[in-house]
Amino acid sequence: MHFLTKKTAVLAAVTLFLHFSLLTPTLKAEEARIKDIAVINSWDHCILSFSVTGCFTEEMKKAIDNGIDTTFTFYIELYEVRKLWWDRQVADLSVSHSIKYDNLKKVYMVTLSEKDDKVFYVEDFDKAKKVMSEIKGFGITRLHNLQKGKRYQVRMMTELDKITLPFYLDYVFFFLSLWDFETDWYTVDFSY
């Protein structure tokens, strides 16, 4: 079994640095943002849906196609808005979507934590991106936790989890910046 020496690891890091910083044209990714936000009530839950745009770059697609797992974490908070007192937190949730490419089967495996870690197999990257970047019909809280006539606020944001590189690439700090994104916090007010 062959292990990389420190000298080889540094050489690999320098090579990657030159490739990504000097040889690869700079692609400005659009800023990640949340859109299409909808808060509705079912017969027993407060339901949230939204999507994230601008969360994939060409570099990310190449890395995913080369076996690097990628996870988005969605943070969702629900507050009762109160005038003369601090807002009361009703829910503080996080869900994650992970994508991994199976090179043998030529399929993207997308795992959704809010669907009990169900794995969706998708052959087309654009469809996999859509599944990764959408929260659809997510139950924030049961309606019995809300009071009629009160105002509420849902806050949400998304971030790309930090990538864990193999030990010999830990020297390549610039590589992590290609994977660094988070949206701003988005807020929607509603009355129940």
Image (cartoon, rainbow, N blue to C red):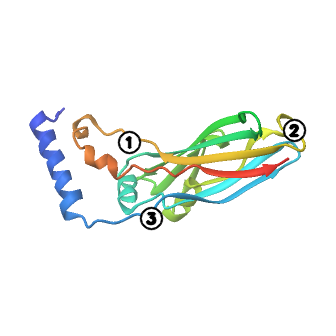
Q: Which residue occupies the extreme left position in the image?
A: 7
Residue under pointer 3: 30
Q: Earlier in the sequence, mark 2 or mark 3?
A: 3
**For the residue labelled by badge 1, is the local secondary structure a helix, a strand or a loop?**
loop
In the image, is residue 59 above or below residue 148?
A: below
Pair 2/3: label in front = 2
Q: Label 1, label 2: how many angstroms apart (C-alpha)?
A: 41 Å
Number of other residues with Cα within 10 Å of mark 1, as a class: few under 14, some 14 to 19, many 20 or more: some
Q: Amino acid at mark 3?
A: Glu
Which quadrant would residue 73 be assigned to in this image? top right
Q: Which residue is painted at 40% across and 61% down in the image?
A: 57
**For the residue labelled by badge 2, is the local secondary structure a helix, a strand or a loop?**
loop
Pair 1/2: label in front = 2
Question: How many numbered callouts?
Answer: 3
Percent position (x, y) of residue 69? 42, 45
Percent position (x, y) of residue 128? 53, 58
Q: Amino acid at mark 1?
A: Ile
Q: Which residue is painted at 55% across and 53% down in the image?
A: 132
Q: Earlier in the sequence, mark 1 or mark 2?
A: 2
Seen in the image, is 173 located left or right of residue 116?
left
Q: Amino acid at mark 2?
A: Gln
Q: Which residue is painted at 29% across and 49% down in the image?
A: 175
Residue under pointer 2: 147
Q: Label 1, label 3: how many angstroms apart (C-alpha)?
A: 20 Å
Residue under pointer 1: 163
* Front-lying residue, 155 or 141: 155
Percent position (x, y) of residue 163? 38, 42
Q: Label 2, label 3: how many angstroms apart (C-alpha)?
A: 40 Å
